[in-house]
Image (cartoon, rainbow, N blue to C red):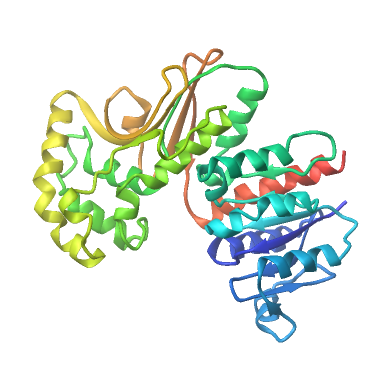
């Protein structure tokens, strides 16, 4: 049986997912609807490589969530339908219960529904409750892009393991920045913090305004998601977040921020020297601690022997410490980028295809 996929948000990640489905000539997935913020297109047959031109044509309709959903319902598809949300939009995320109650499954890399309003998260879990015939929700790509983070955590929880700690470097941007800024490699040329941030921005690793990475909120959202999957009712108010943007730079324009950041290089250099003198490096880390009830996002120190200290490039690394895994179960690899995010989405939809054929 083929699973029909209707995509909301056909930017970088959505387009990459379609490209992967077409390239692999999948026999299990048919992309039958696409939508951007202005218009949408539904098709009785799988969309082809010309989908962008088709969406821009007169055959498309003005987009609203209600109109898009009504069009899917009107198609009376006999095959299961997955709505794939590739936006980062809160309004779209708030629509998940409507899709689920309509009998559609949901797959998404959008973190908003799983890290925002707790009542929305619980409503989604209430509908997608795992009962036979209930709709399915997969969101592997909300943490670590295509890395098997959510799937692994679900497996640990569902098999009755006790989670004692989840710790990780969840931001490819901050991984790159601190892997290059704070190192125990004696042969490495010392570099200013502002310079590393500037290079990361030029390489496209940061958001257009790097403070959106440095303030820790993206990492906090991932901590909340993992905490909730582990059974904790985490919210933004219950996670202690260390914003490493100097306070005097928080209200400036992005251009002024980059211009004045070098004035605070001494501050970051002092933190780095203190760590290195103790045989440690700086890493920006998210923590879920069910045992002590403390979850946080902080700039922390790690000795050279720790797996976080030897991380390279912009990789993510996540360590699960549990009753069965007192020596942490570690997942490491590329945690950002359209290709790996689309891979995570693709994998989730294939899981739905397998489950709905049973």
Q: Residue furthest bottom?
A: 58
* Towards the viewer: 146 or 65: 65
Residue 66 placement: quadrant = bottom right
Q: Is residue 351 left or right of residue 121?
A: right
| Residue shown at 45% from the left, 36% from the top | 223
* Towards the viewer: 281 or 246: 246
Tally of marks: 0
Residue 313 placement: quadrant = top left
The image position of residue 287, as x and y in percent, is 40, 30
The image position of residue 94, as x and y in percent, is 60, 53
Please say if 39 is above or below 158. Answer: below
| Residue shown at 41% from the left, 40% from the top | 220
| Residue shown at 71% from the left, 63% from the top | 22
Q: Is residue 140 left or right of residue 306?
A: right
| Residue shown at 71% from the left, 86% from the top | 58
Please say if 321 is above or below 106. Answer: above
Where does the C terminus fall, quadrant-wise? top right
Please say if 255 is above or below 297. Answer: below
Q: Is residue 114 left or right of residue 181?
A: right
The image position of residue 301, as x and y in percent, is 25, 28
The image position of residue 107, as x and y in percent, is 66, 50
Residue 30 placement: quadrant = bottom right
């Amino acid at each position: 049986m083929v699973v029909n996929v209707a995509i909301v948000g056909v930017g970088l990640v959505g387009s990459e997912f379609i490209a992967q489905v077409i390239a692999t000539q999948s026999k299990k997935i048919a992309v039958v609807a696409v939508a951007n913020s202005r218009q949408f297109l539904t098709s009785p047959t799988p969309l082809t490589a010309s989908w962008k031109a088709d969406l821009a044509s007169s055959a498309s309709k003005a987009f609203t969530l209600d109109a898009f959903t009504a069009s899917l319902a009107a198609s009376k598809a006999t095959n299961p339908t997955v709505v794939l949300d590739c936006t980062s939009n809160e309004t779209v995320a708030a629509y998940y219960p409507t899709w689920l109650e309509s009998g559609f499954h949901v797959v998404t890399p959008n973190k908003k529904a799983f890290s925002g309003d707790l009542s929305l998260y619980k409503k989604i879990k209430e509908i997608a409750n795992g009962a036979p015939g209930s709709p399915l929700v997969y969101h592997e790509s909300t943490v670590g892009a295509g890395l098997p983070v959510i799937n692994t955590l679900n497996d640990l929880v569902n098999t009755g393991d006790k989670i004692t700690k989840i710790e990780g470097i969840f931001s490819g941007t901050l991984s790159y920045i601190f892997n290059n800024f704070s190192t125990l490699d004696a042969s490495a040329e010392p570099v200013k913090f502002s310079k590393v941030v500037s290079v990361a921005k030029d390489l496209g690793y940061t958001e257009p305004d790097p403070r959106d990475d440095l303030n820790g909120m993206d990492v906090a959202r991932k901590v909340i998601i993992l905490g909730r999957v582990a059974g904790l009712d985490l919210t933004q108010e219950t996670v202690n977040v260390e914003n490493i943007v100097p306070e005097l730079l928080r209200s400036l324009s992005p251009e002024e921020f980059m211009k004045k950041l070098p004035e605070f290089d001494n501050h970051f250099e002092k933190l780095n020297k203190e760590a290195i003198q103790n045989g440690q490096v700086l890493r920006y880390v998210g923590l879920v601690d069910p045992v002590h009830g403390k979850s946080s996002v902080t700039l922390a120190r790690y000795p050279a022997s720790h797996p976080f200290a030897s991380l390279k490039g912009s990789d993510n690394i996540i360590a699960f410490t549990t009753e069965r895994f007192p020596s942490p179960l570690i997942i490491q690899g590329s945690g950002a980028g359209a290709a790996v995010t689309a891979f995570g989405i693709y994998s989730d939809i294939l899981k739905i295809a397998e489950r709905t054929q049973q």
